[in-house]
Amino acid sequence: MANRTKDHFAMLYRHYLKQVQVQYDTDPQIMMATEQLIARANRQTALTNRQRDNSPNTVK
């Protein structure tokens, strides 16, 4: 029973991912928003890394 439920969930999830991919590929607003989120996350990571590297507690 658990395997059937897991298989069913996996099938639904794959279907969901296909829908999201189609939407992503056809909607430029979603693509732009995603790219902006990735850029923001990358900037935040760079800032965090700089703060860590400049911290007096960092072993150099």
Image (spheres, rainbow, N blue to C red):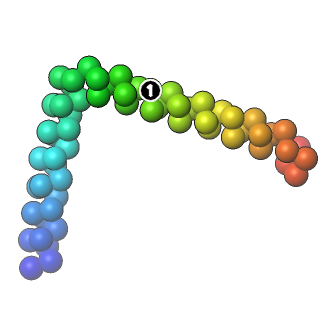
Q: Quadrant of residue 20?
A: top left
Name of the residue lying farthest toward the bottom: 1
Q: Which residue is mark 1?
A: 36
What is the x, y in percent for residue 46?
66, 33
Q: Quadrant of residue 12?
A: bottom left
**Quadrant occupied by the C terminus:** top right
Q: Nearer the viewer, residue 42 or 10?
A: 42
Question: Would residue 41 be visible to someone looking at this image?
Answer: yes
Q: Nearer the viewer, residue 60 or 25?
A: 25
Residue at image location 62% in from the left, 37% down from the top: 45
Residue at image location 37% in from the left, 30% down from the top: 34
Q: Quadrant of residue 22?
A: top left
Q: Secondary structure at mark 1?
A: helix
**Quadrant occupied by the N terminus:** bottom left
Q: Amino acid at mark 1?
A: Gln
Q: Nearer the viewer, residue 6 or 46?
A: 46
Residue 42 vertical placement versus 17 (above, below): above
Residue at image location 15% in from the left, 62% down from the top: 9
Residue 47 vertical placement versus 12 (above, below): above
Residue 11 vertical placement versus 17 (above, below): below
